[in-house]
Amino acid sequence: MTALLAIISIILIGIIAVQIGKVTELAGKIRGEEEMQDLSNRRQSNYMLVFLVLFLVGGVISAIYYRNYMLGFGPMESASEHGASIDRIFQITLFFTGIVFVITHILLFWFAYKYRARKGQVARYIPHDNKLEIVWTVIPAIVMAFLVMGGLDVWNEVMADVGPDEEVLEIEATGFQFGWSVRYPGEDGKLGEKNYKLISGTNPLGQNWEDEKNLDDFQPTEIVLPVGQKVRVRITSKDVLHNFYLPHFRVKMDAVPGIPTYFVFTPTKTTEEFRQQLRNYPEYNVLADPDDAELGMLWENFNYELACAELCGRGHYSMRMPVRIVSQDEYESWKASQSSYYMSTIRGTSNDPWTNRLFDFEIEERREEFNSKLDEIISGEAESRAIELQYVNFETGSAELLSISRYELDYVAEALNNNTDLRVELAGHTDDTGSEERNQTLAQERAEAVKKYLVDKGIAANRLVAKGYGATQPLESNETEAGREANRRTEFRVLSGAL
Ligand SMILES: [Cu+2]
């Protein structure tokens, strides 16, 4: 609709222009061409003056009116350490180029007025003027040299990388059509290796899972940073050029496929502090949404943001990500609430190279689970005196322990060592596939294998009874694979020693 109205307006303006042209032509024929020309020149030159005044006054008024929205002015001062230097050099540049801009534009329009074509007036011919040329070469050269040197100084300060021993939080941002993937190092503080060849549906960044540094890396949906912490952002792209732009921190760097770039900065104001700063200005003391008073004021709804500053395609506008600057404590608790991409998406799948190994915290979790069950049995609170050894597994159809079983057997041995009065039956089971006789033998052999492992770990053989039950005591239904798996587990049954 708007487009249609705009097109109609343009057509009408065109018609009017043509009509005025026709009228002027006719009037010209009546009055004589020369007189008409003179009138037109006078009129045009007056328009030039009017435009000059409107343009300059309008420029000044709009700058004053919008000053509190512009970066570097009013409440929009930089929220990062280096940002103040960038703002300063921008303002110095604006000051000098502003003076030149105003003077040259006054001259441009004034000359157009003063030297309009007039009857009998001839232009003066000046082929060359040394003095003039020196003035307009030397003055700009000095000013430019001054600006460029100041700019270089700021550039070197802003683009400095971190020193080898400097304490820095390194995160990674990868642009893609159309969004950002942000990766944080986990507890180890180090980002894991990646390789574009490993990129797949379940591995969007191509992380190499064999590199242990990757295992605790997490990919949050917002950027959260502690205030006052030096941050180094590795910036890359998966497809086309993007640009990592944090306007409030004066951080801006291209994301180039194949060429890693970086930006180092230190946020100096938390989101809350920035909101309080905005609160002092009437522009931000209006309802955020006039139709929804519950949202509160504009300043309350302020959030820092990451945007893409490179026109990268149709969905460019949607490349935004919220950024939050918080205190160190808040950051720590946020970080603790994030789960590693590997643990939530890759662990235990066919892409996991570590299926044969447990991580310390996993062992710890399982050990605690086992010990708390054992404590319940010992204190007499438990309903059953048996604990399923969930993580003790065998080769299919054999009594050969899988190597992953060692973790559970180790803490079982530890528990037996800590409770020396316990006597335990190790009950071997199978599912109902295969003959009864074979299952009975297999269950016995499996129970013996568990016993042997524990005896090898130093547990007295007379405290352990290995007994096979075949498929006679199923814990679950044999109808499903999960049920059959549960029915193959060995049980740890406390015979005596418990109170
Ligand atoms: Cu982009």
Image (cartoon, grey):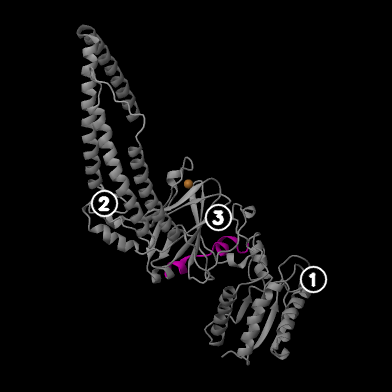
Q: CA distance from mark 2 to mark 3?
A: 35 Å
Front residue (pair 228, 443): 228
Q: Main secondary structure of the magenta part?
A: helix
| Residue 141 x/y as whole percent | 38, 46
Q: Is residue 449 above or below residue 337?
A: below
Secondary structure type for disc 3: loop
Q: What range is drawn magenta here?
A: 333-348
Kindly identify the amino acid type of the residue bearing the numbered disc 2: Asn
Give residue 260's mark. Answer: 3
Magenta-colored stretch includes residue 344? yes
Q: What residue does disc 1 label?
A: 438
Q: Nearer the viewer, mark 1 or mark 2?
A: 2
Q: Amino acid at mark 1?
A: Arg
Image coordinates for residue 100, horizontal then vertical, percent: 30, 43
Q: Residue beneath label 2, please?
A: 68
How far separated are the C-alphas under marks 1 and 3?
A: 61 Å
Q: Give whichever of 87, 146 is nearer the camera.
A: 146
Figure quadrant of residue 295: bottom left
**Nearest to viewer (mark 1 / mark 3):** 3
Left or right: 490 in relation to 219 = right
Q: Quadrant of the N terminus?
A: top left
